[in-house]
Image (cartoon, rainbow, N blue to C red):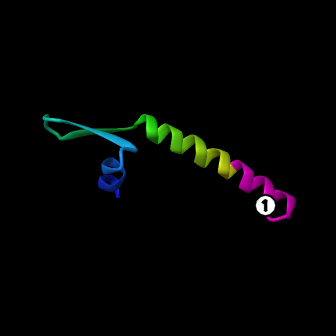
Amino acid sequence: MVAGVEADGIVHRESYDVVPPKVEYSLTELGDELNTALGAWGKRRMAVLEEAGQG
């Protein structure tokens, strides 16, 4: 899964040549945009569910 989001430019992977191995992941600018969009969608969805008495 990580390879897909990395290849799609959503996540940046930084690996370090140390022992024990160390890898850090961070969102790219595109990842930040996606995170914002999904957060807004989630808030709207929760409001709809609450109005329907399902939240």
Q: Residue at left 14%, top 34%? A: 18
Residue 15: image quadrant is top left
Residue 4: image quadrant is bottom left
Quadrant occupied by the N terminus:
bottom left
Q: Is residue 45 magenta?
A: yes
- Residue 11 at what x, y percent from top left? 37, 43
Count all numbered tags in the image, as a single digit.
1
Disc 1 target residue: 49
Q: Is residue 45 above or below residue 13?
A: below
Answer with left or right where residue 6 lies relative to residue 17: right
Residue stretch in magenta: 43-55
Answer with left or right where residue 52 lies relative to residue 27: right
Q: Residues within 10 Å of mark 1 (few under 14, many from 20)?
A: few
Q: Is residue 35 above or below residue 16?
A: below
- Residue 21 at what x, y percent from top left? 18, 41
Quadrant occupied by the C terminus:
bottom right
- Residue 33 at what x, y percent from top left? 52, 39
Q: Is residue 32 above or below residue 8?
A: above
Q: Residue at left 62%, top 45%? A: 39
Q: Is residue 12 above or below residue 2?
A: above
The foreground one among 24 and 31 is 31
Secondary structure character of the magenta stretch overall: helix
Q: Residue at left 78%, top 61%? A: 49
Three-letter amino acid code of the residue under disc 1: Leu
Q: Residue at left 66%, top 51%? A: 41
Name the secondary structure under disc 1: helix
Q: Is residue 16 magenta?
A: no
